[in-house]
Image (cartoon, rainbow, N blue to C red):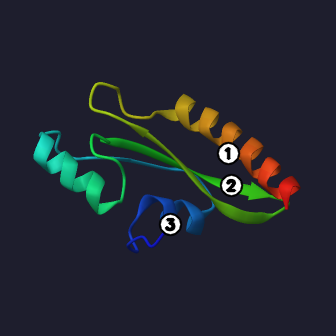
Amino acid sequence: MAYRESHPALQAAERGGSVRASATRTDETAAARWAAARKWPEGSVHALCAVLRSRGRTLGVVTFLRGPARRPFDRPDTAYAEDVAARVAAAVDLAR
């Protein structure tokens, strides 16, 4: 999928680590534009992008999204997402 240069998934892939992002304004119109600009479903206001890495190679990025009723992602969420990403990356790598 083609993303803009500042997209959180691309930032995560470039730096090799997780990136958290949230809409700065929570009114529905601004949040909808924020999500649409990132090619995420309407209603997404918080995101966590974790890198899929296996055997020293970046295979992709997995993105977790939350709506406005949920709190932003924090450090424990990031640790869990990175664990999930490592398992997904291993499965993808083994499937190749």
Counting residues from the start of the chain, the first of labels 3 and 2 encountered is: 3
Q: Position of residue 76 (x, y in %)?
A: 56, 29
Q: Position of residue 61 (x, y in %)?
A: 59, 57
Secondary structure, mark 2, is strand
Counting residues from the start of the chain, the first of labels 1 and 2 encountered is: 2
Residue position marked by numbered label 2 in the rendering: 52
Q: Residue at x 83, y 57 (%)?
A: 93
As shown in the figure, which amino acid type bears the numbered disc 2? Leu
Q: Are marks 1 and 2 in contact (CB under 8 Å)?
A: yes
As shown in the figure, which amino acid type bears the numbered disc 1? Ala
Q: Is residue 69 above or below residue 5?
A: above
Q: Is residue 55 above or below residue 31?
A: below
Q: Residue at x 40, y 64 (%)?
A: 7
Q: Is residue 77 above or below residue 51?
A: above
**Label disc, if present, on residue 4 of the rendered structure:** none
Q: Residue at x 26, y 47 (%)?
A: 23
**Label disc, if present, on residue 85 of the rendered structure:** 1
Closer to the camera, 74 or 57?
Answer: 57
Q: Position of residue 26 (x, y in %)?
A: 17, 39
As shown in the figure, which amino acid type bears the numbered disc 3? Leu
Q: Residue at x 88, y 54 (%)?
A: 94
Q: Is residue 94 left or right of residue 19?
A: right
Q: Position of residue 11 (x, y in %)?
A: 49, 64
**Label disc, if present, on residue 10 of the rendered structure:** 3
Q: Is residue 6 above or below residue 42?
A: below
Secondary structure, mark 1, is helix
Measured Cα–Cα span from mark 3 to mark 1: 15 Å
Closer to the camera, 80 or 94?
Answer: 94
Measured Cα–Cα span from mark 3 to mark 2: 12 Å
Quarter of the image holding residue 77? Answer: top right
